[in-house]
Amino acid sequence: MTKNSNAYQPLTAAVFHILLALVDGEKHGYAIMKDVEAQTSGHIKMGPGTLYGSLKRMQTAGLIEESGDRPDPKMDDERRRYYRLTGMGQNVIKSESQRLADLVQVARQKHVLVIALKSEGGL
Amino acid sequence: MKNNIWVRISRHIYARLLNLYPKAHRNEYGTDMLQVFTDECKACFEDGKGFKLLPLWLRTLGDLIVNVVKEHISDPQSTVGLIEAAPNSPLPWKGVLLVLVPGLFFFVSQVAMLVNQNEDWYSWMSRRAAYVLMLPVLVIWIWKRKFPVWGLVPLGLLFCTFLNSFWFHFEVLSVNFNQQPIIVWLIEHTNGLLPSFMNKALAITFLLCTIGLLWFLKKRSSIPKFAWVLLGVYGLLVILDFGAGYGFQMDSTHNFLHTILVIAYFGFYCYGGYLVLILLGTFLAKRHGKLTLLLLIGFLLPTITSSEDWGILVYRFVVALAAPIWIVRSATGKRQGRAGVISIAALLVFQFIIGESFNNPIQVIDQFIMAAGLALAIVLYKKVSESQSTQPEMDMILEGSSIHNS
């Protein structure tokens, strides 16, 4: 690891969601896009430009890498490119998730989260 | 699933739109992006909700616009021509288009003025366009830490706007500073001395800047002998201009010294700024070579005089569009210099013939002053661009820091 994972914080929404989508395993672009949509209940719908722009920058930063393997060539188009997390990518998503969890904890302590949930009828 | 016709049309259109991305990005990710978009289109129809194609397109177009701009600016390959001139080659068309934006602003306003007699619009353009056009240049400069070559035209225009509109028309958008209560109060309570003081202050600033820049250039031995001759001619013509225009009309009660001081003060107020611009251009010439002539093209844009004569339109076309295209599309070196010289000569000829300057001796001197200034610029820029191409202190001045993104 050449760079501390904290150095990437805070991640942009696009990068965070892509990393989160790749935690489950390697995926191609469209699968990442659909996964992000599912993760956010349809609130974030990435366009191809944002997706591949982010993938390019993440590859350059060493957070992800292209995978040579294909899960099952019969099930998918061989021309698709698959991406997976690198060691650095895994560290970055962990530290970013921890940072967000800490923030949520602070919000809970200050009763901000409870108020927000109540106002939405959650509690 | 067999492709729906709307999916096929959408795929075809998106494939065309992908050409807007930089070539390197397109080659690397174009196929994948098209595949993802096609998958999304198919998903819309598989759900049996073909009408979802419209929101998909709206979302995709927004995504395309934002990311095309982002990729063009952030892609290191695209900086060639867009940010800096590539050595020994003309600017690519995307660089040329950016150079032409200020010219298009002015040319369209001129045509509108001739067709619609809409002088309000023309005034708005001539007085405020520089502030608007300079904004993207500043953004790029701050972002890339490099002054973009296409920013030379707006820079020249901005300099001219400051010089011409310093006191009487200092307007930004709808704000006329000249009518602000504080300024009005100052004018009233200084018995009209303040504008005179400001003009004198500007004249003295230009004089000091000229001396300082000449000293700096001389120290670096980058002033050729011929430039000194042109500088002398320039000074003599300025004195002659004001001697002819104002000196002989001096009140007989004023002595000779007073007359000289008034000529010097008016001379530096009206022409000192032009001289400072030419000398400052030598710093930019370190990076952009003779393309720095675009700075003077930008400066000349507002001199496109108001007239109802359609012949003037030709002159305006040359200044605003034809000359910049020719200069930036010529390869660096002799061709670029020749394009600059011929363009400037053409401008002067147009000004003489179409502007009917022959009838007015003062205007004739004005044209020669402009010609001497432009010749001085060409000589200085040629000398600078032929000398060593990189010097640390020049980079520091131009970039504001030592960070290089190339």
Image (cartoon, coloured by chain):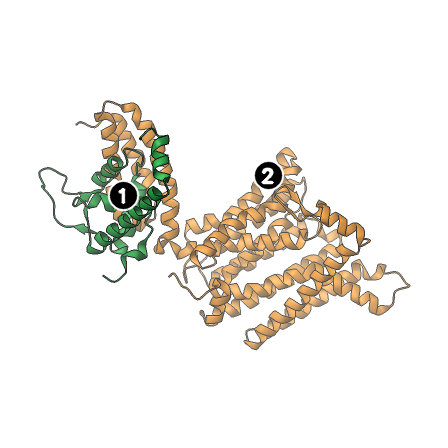
Chain colours: A green, B orange
Residue annotated with mark 1: A17
Horizontal side, residue B42 vs residue B168: left or right: left
Residue A66, position as x, y percentages in the image: 19, 50
Label 2 resides on the chain identified as B
* The label number, if any, that marks residue B51 in the structure image: none
Q: Is A57 situated above or below B33?
A: below
Horizontal side, residue B48 vs residue B309: left or right: left
Question: How much space separates mark 2 and mark 1, taking CA atoms?
Answer: 51 Å
Horizontal side, residue B368 vs residue B7: left or right: right
Labels 2, 1: front one: 1
Residue nearer the viewer, B349 or B173:
B173
Residue nearer the viewer, B399 or B335:
B399
Residue B1, position as x, y percentages in the image: 17, 27
Residue annotated with mark 2: B111
Residue B314, position as x, y percentages in the image: 59, 45
Label 1 resides on the chain identified as A
* Residue at 24% over, 42% down: B31
- Residue B370 lies in what quarter of the image? bottom right
Kind of residue sitting beneath label 1:
His
Is residue B287 shown to the viewer in this render? Answer: yes
